Image (tube, grey):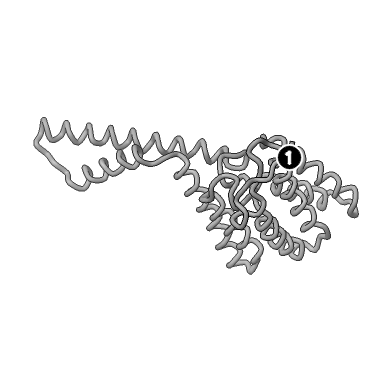
């Protein structure tokens, strides 16, 4: 299922929340933001709308490692050939950069960058005593390393996401945040259940995917 479809469904849930709960511009913005983000968050386990920019950055970094390593080795080689100068540290670093660019996949760099963002959230939650933020950071940090449509596409992830949203609801003193977040997250799993691959709702207890025609 495309990210735009998930976002549209999440937005619809957010709009419904705006009409159901007492209206204000602040609360409406929060409901829409929470619904949209929750509807997309399950796909943090792979390339998605949420990580598209980071995916572009990971490709750029990989190409940078390759070119910097290659050009550095070329320059150091010329210095050795023409001037008989050999710099062990620079040569080792250049070879390491080139090898890193060759053997590292873009997905590994993307996952690392996303995990660093999650680690930042964990630290922020710890400093500001916002434990729901630390929980969100832990989810963001761990999710990229799961197989696509693995643990983030399960009923257990819904419970985890609901617990995080409960903390946010208490923080903002805004009713319905947990409900909006959970329904939006569930909407993602339901939409993916209509795809040919289906969703492993009960993984790892039951490893076969559930599919709907």
Residue 163 pos. (x, y %): 70, 63
When asked about the image quadrant of residue 9, the answer is top right
Query: What is the x, y in percent for residue 132?
Result: 66, 63
| 209 horizontally vs 107: left or right | right
As drawn, 80 above or below 177: above
Residue at x-position 57% and y-position 42%: 51
Q: Position of residue 34 (x, y in %)?
A: 74, 50
Question: Mark 1 Cα within 10 Å, few/some/many (few <14, many 20+)?
Answer: few
Horizontally, is 94 left or right of 147 in the view? left
Residue 136 is drawn in which quadrant? bottom right
Q: Which residue is at 78% across, 42% downward? A: 11
Quarter in which the C terminus is drawn:
top right
Say which of 121 and 87 sits in front.
121
Residue at image location 65% in from the left, 66% down from the top: 130
Which of the pair 59/193 is nearer the observer? 193
Query: How many numbered circles does the render carry?
Result: 1
Judging by the rendered image, the residue that carries numbered circle 1 is 212
In the image as oriented, which residue stretches furthest toward the left?
84
In terms of secondary structure, where does tag 1 sit?
loop
Q: In the picture shown, does residue 171 fall above or below 69? A: below
Q: Residue 115: x and y, percent? A: 51, 52
Q: Quadrant of the N terminus?
A: top right
Quadrant of the image occupied by residue 77: top left
Q: Nearer the viewer, residue 46 or 177?
A: 46
Residue 118 in the image: above or below residue 74: below
Above or below, 79 against 190 in this view is: above
Question: In the shown orientation, is residue 22 left or right of residue 198?
Answer: right
Q: Residue furthest bottom?
A: 129
Which residue is at a point 28% across and 32% down the rendered structure image? 71
């Amino acid at each position: 299922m495309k990210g735009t479809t998930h976002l549209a469904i999440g937005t619809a849930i957010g709009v419904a929340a705006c009409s159901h709960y007492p209206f204000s511009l602040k609360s409406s913005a929060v409901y829409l933001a929470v619904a949209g983000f929750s509807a997309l968050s399950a796909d943090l386990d792979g390339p998605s709308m949420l990580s598209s920019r980071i995916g572009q950055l990971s490709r750029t970094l990989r190409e940078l490692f390759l070119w910097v390593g290659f050009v550095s080795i070329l320059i150091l080689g010329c210095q050795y050939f023409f001037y008989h100068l050999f710099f062990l540290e620079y040569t080792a670093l250049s070879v390491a950069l080139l090898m890193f660019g060759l053997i590292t996949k873009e997905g590994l760099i993307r996952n690392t960058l996303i995990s660093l963002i999650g680690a930042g959230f964990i630290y922020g939650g710890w400093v500001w005593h916002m434990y729901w933020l630390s929980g969100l950071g832990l989810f963001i940090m761990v999710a990229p390393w799961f197989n696509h449509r693995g643990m983030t596409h399960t009923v257990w992830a819904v419970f985890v996401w609901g617990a995080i949203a409960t903390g946010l609801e208490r923080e903002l003193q805004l009713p319905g945040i947990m409900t909006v977040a959970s329904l939006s997250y569930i909407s993602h799993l339901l939409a993916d259940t209509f795809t040919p691959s289906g969703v492993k709702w009960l993984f790892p207890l039951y490893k076969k995917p559930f599919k709907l025609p």
